[in-house]
Image (spheres, helix red, strand yellow):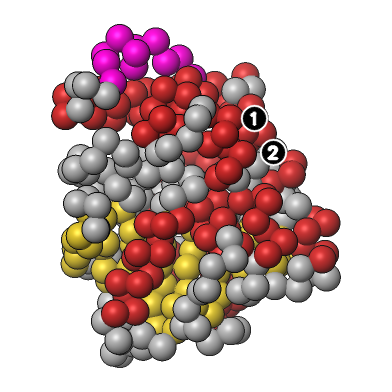
């Protein structure tokens, strides 16, 4: 019955959902993480860029793979903060930039989405081919958290080196969480996502004018419209609703066999209630659920350098190494 009681008690200011979310995304200062970029060439002609950082004090035989969120990349503060924390404690880190997210448009019309677990599998296979690591762990944020949970529960044979995983602020029911983002209190976040994603689509139109038009992009006024126009069609789904249904991690959670921790704050306005599925956690001894009262969306700030989830992820993962 792995329902975990949270010990997260934030400073009073960060009990506010908006302040916690915005500060963590835009104002948090993190130490520089020396990184080396590896370009992973894919069989379909595309590529994924991986930003590597090394353990500070030793040659490591363990690596943490980090998956970013929607409209993110491996340079976001939440990725760098986690990488720094794990590097400091003896881990190498492979921070993934999903297709098209590393500052250079990818070569194919398709890019990334919340269910693209095949790409994660390719990354893990590449890391194992180096024959350097005995232990692998994965940490996914938001969209990357949903992708991670889906990957773990799809029923594929996972490598024995994969010891544990952590998902943070993961929208396990994509459609229900999309509707939460449409609420008036989330207008600012939704508006920003739409603006940034349309900017990327206009860039993609220049490279693939036969696939999508400026007029189509201009008509998109919300995230659902973008998923209906681009995300679903570019990745082989009939429509947005089929994309949400087949990509949502919720239906894969009961099948997870790798020790996995999901941390979703109760005051996270991006997430639907069923993104924190208590009943599933009670019936799957490998799936741990922690729901702090506070934290916002990928917030969890403290009166010290590391966030609560950075410390929590290290402690949970280390218990299985």
Residue 148, position as x, y percentages in the image = 52, 59
Give the mark, 2 or 1, whose residue is nearer the N terminus: 1
Q: Which residue is mark 2?
A: 272
Residue 64, position as x, y percentages in the image = 41, 72
* Vertical arrangement, residue 183 with respect to residue 261, above or below: above
Identify the disc placed on residue 194.
none
Q: Secondary structure at mark 2?
A: loop
Quadrant in which the N terminus is drawn = bottom right
Q: Could you tell me which residue is drawn at 62 percent across and 33 percent down?
A: 175
The total of numbered circles placed on residues is 2
Q: Which residue is mark 1?
A: 180
Residue 198, position as x, y percentages in the image = 34, 23
* Vertical arrangement, residue 223 with respect to residue 261, above or below: above
* Vertical arrangement, residue 104 with respect to residue 186, above or below: below
Residue 66 among those drawn in magenta: no
25 left or right of 185? Answer: left
| Circles 2 and 1: CB atoms closer than 8 Å | yes
Is residue 110 visible in the rendered image? The answer is: yes
218 left or right of 10? Answer: left
Residue 12, position as x, y percentages in the image = 65, 47
Q: Residues within 10 Å of mark 1 (few under 14, many from 20)?
A: some
**Magenta part of the chain:** 212-222
Q: Could you tell me which residue is drawn at 41 percent across and 88 percent down?
A: 134
């Amino acid at each position: 019955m792995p329902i975990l009681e949270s010990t997260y008690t934030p400073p009073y200011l960060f009990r506010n959902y908006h302040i916690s979310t915005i500060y963590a995304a835009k104002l948090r200062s993190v130490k520089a993480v020396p990184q080396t970029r590896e370009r992973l060439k894919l069989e379909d002609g595309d590529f994924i860029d991986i930003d590597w950082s090394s353990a500070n004090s030793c040659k490591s035989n363990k690596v943490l793979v980090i998956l970013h969120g929607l409209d993110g990349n491996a340079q976001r503060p939440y990725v760098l903060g986690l990488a720094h924390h794990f590097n400091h404690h003896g881990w190498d880190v492979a921070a993934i930039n999903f297709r098209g997210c590393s500052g250079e448009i990818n070569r194919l019309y398709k890019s990334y989405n919340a269910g693209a677990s095949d790409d994660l599998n390719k990354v893990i296979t590449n890391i194992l081919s180096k024959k350097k690591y005995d232990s692998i762990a994965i940490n996914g944020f938001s969209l990357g958290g949903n992708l991670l949970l889906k990957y773990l529960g799809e029923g594929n044979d996972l490598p024995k080196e994969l010891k544990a995983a952590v998902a943070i602020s993961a929208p396990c029911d994509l459609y229900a969480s999309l509707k939460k983002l449409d609420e008036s209190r989330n207008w600012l976040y939704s508006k920003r996502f739409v603006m940034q994603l349309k900017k990327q689509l206009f860039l993609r139109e220049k490279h693939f004018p036969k696939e999508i038009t400026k007029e189509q992009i201009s008509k998109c006024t919300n995230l659902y419209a973008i998923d209906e126009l681009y995300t679903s069609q570019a990745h082989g789904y009939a429509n947005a609703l089929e994309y949400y249904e087949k990509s949502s991690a919720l239906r894969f959670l009961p099948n997870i066999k790798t020790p996995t921790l999901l941390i979703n704050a109760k005051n996270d306005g991006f997430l639907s209630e069923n993104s924190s599925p208590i009943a599933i956690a009670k019936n799957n001894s490998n799936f741990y659920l922690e729901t702090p009262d506070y934290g916002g969306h990928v917030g969890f700030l403290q009166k010290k350098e590391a966030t609560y989830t950075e410390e929590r992820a290290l402690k949970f993962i280390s218990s299985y190494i």
